[in-house]
Amino acid sequence: MTQMFDVRQGLQDARVDREGAWRFIRGFAHAWVEPLGDGDGFSEEDLAAAQERLGVRLPAALGEMYHLLGRREDLTSNHDRLLPPDQLYIDARGQALVFREENQGACSWGVLLEDLDQADPGVHVLADLADRQAQRW
């Protein structure tokens, strides 16, 4: 490696826009694990099939992430698990598109269905509580 990856600067740039975030991920992967390459993401067909099955459109940012590195478990699933497109689901209450799960089922991450029209919506967490009525995204 001829040049060190500046994590601090990369994180600052990543906060500006999505392209900055993707640059950070590419740089991080290159410096610390293995560079991103062809085949590290899911295809348009994979995402289209998931959208068809679910009856919703993925936000642009989520689709871009799946295209860029969705198959790279070393970057996406060290503890919690990024769901592959064919396992994405709408939560039981019909409130969110779930794309990530905690490894022991303690919580899930998703995008509220009402926010799916946004290019880069906020991500919400749903904790698995004993009192299901108290659960909130």
Image (cartoon, rainbow, N blue to C red):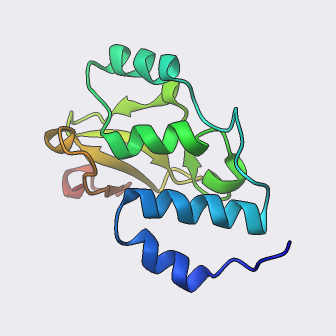
For the N terminus, the image quarter is: bottom right
**In this picture, residue 72 sits left or right of residue 16:** right
Q: Residue drawn 77% across and 77% down? A: 3
Image height of 63 relative to 14, above or below? above
Quick one: 56 or 4, which is closer to the camera? 4
Measured as percent of width and height from the top left, residue 101 is found at 49, 48
Q: Nearer the viewer, residue 102 or 55?
A: 55
Query: Which residue appears farthest toward the front when viewing the image?
Result: 2
Between 7 and 70, which is closer to the camera in this rendering? 7
Q: Which quadrant would residue 31 be assigned to in this image?
A: bottom right
Q: Residue at x 55, y 33 (%)?
A: 84
* 114 relative to 130, above or below: above
In the image, residue 8 above or below residue 30: below
> In which quarter of the view is residue 88 placed?
top left
Residue at the limit of the structure toward the right, as seen here:
1
Q: Is residue 108 above or below residue 43?
A: below
Image coords of residue 133 (percent x, y): 19, 51
Query: Which quadrant is home to the C terminus?
Result: bottom left
Residue at the left extreme of this rendering: 114
Return the x and y of residue 70 as percentages of the image width and height.
58, 40
Instruction: Choose top left, top right, bottom left or bottom right for residue 26.
Output: bottom right
Q: How many marks?
A: 0
- Give me the residue at 28% from left, 27% from top: 57
Q: Please state the horizontal and vertical placement of residue 39, each as a whole percent of the image.
A: 70, 32
Specify whether 54 is left or right of 50: left
Residue drawn at (44%, 69%) of the image: 14
